[in-house]
Amino acid sequence: MSRPDVSGRAGWIALGAGTAFVILAAAVHADTPHWPDDRFLSWSVAHRSHPAVTVARGVTATGTGAVPYVLAALAGLLAGRSPKQRLLATVLCLACLGVGQTLRFEVMQLVHRTRPPTTDWAAQSTRWAFPSGHTTTSALAAGVLIAAVSLWAPRGATPLRIVIGCWALLVGLTRIYLGVHWSTDVLGGWLFAVGWLGACLWALARWLPDSFTQGAAMGRRPAEDHAPQNPHR
């Protein structure tokens, strides 16, 4: 896929997800649960068991702290071909995650939505609810890692991309299961992450030096492409 194609698709994704996020943020700004929120919360509370809660706490813990930044740094190492490219890619991946977290925090302060009742919590949490921080952070980390894996192994990387995506999905779902977020908080986190990732990819596709993508593509070319050509063919 050419750079203009990538830029165009990323721009439309950013616009679509961003628009949906703004609409959802305006809807939840009234600070009242919407129709799916109470239903999902009630189901989660009614279907909790000690082993399931323990697993959910473990999964949800990977959506914050050092883990997402380690994954973003790994994405940079995979995306680059040369040491210079790896350094640039790592900085860009970490910046995408860090700036995204900062913007998400500002939106959270602006929307000012309260969390579900503390009597339904099965984990500790702080600050406001929308959009879910764990959900947003894990989705951003998963997004940059999936993009890097796609550069590193264009063919045959689908199972790995699915595993990474499922991890981010599970982190978001655990926030609902543990009762510390409404379902619309988690949906908002996913929409925010997709919108911000699309915006970052749009910018990179437009302004990243050609040498970066050309070097990456050459580095992943199948071995048979490098075989000597028969001059008499």
Image (cartoon, helix red, strand yellow):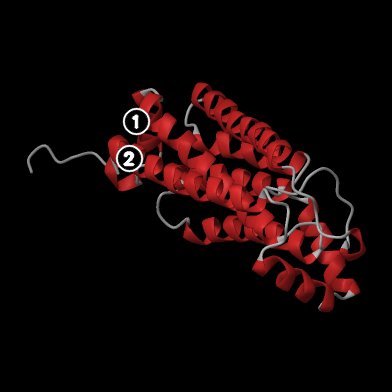
Residues tagged 1 and 2 counted as in contact (Cβ below 8 A): no
- Element assignment for label 2: helix
- Say which residue label 2 marks: 8
- Nearer to us in this view, 10 or 105: 105
Q: In which quarter of the image is residue 207?
A: top left
At label 1, the amino acid type is: Gln
Residue occupied by mark 1: 214
Q: Where is residue 86 in the image (x, y as percent from the top left)?
A: 54, 28
**Nearer the N terminus, badge 1 or badge 2?**
2
Nearest the eye: 225 or 168: 168
Q: What element carries label 1?
A: helix
- Percent x, y of residue 41: 77, 69
Q: In this view, does 83 lie to the left or right of 206?
A: right
Q: Quarter holding the N terminus?
A: top left
Q: In which quarter of the image is residue 7?
A: top left
Q: How crowded is mark 2: few (under 14 residues within 10 Å), some or many (20 or more)?
A: some
Q: Nearer the viewer, residue 112 or 170?
A: 112
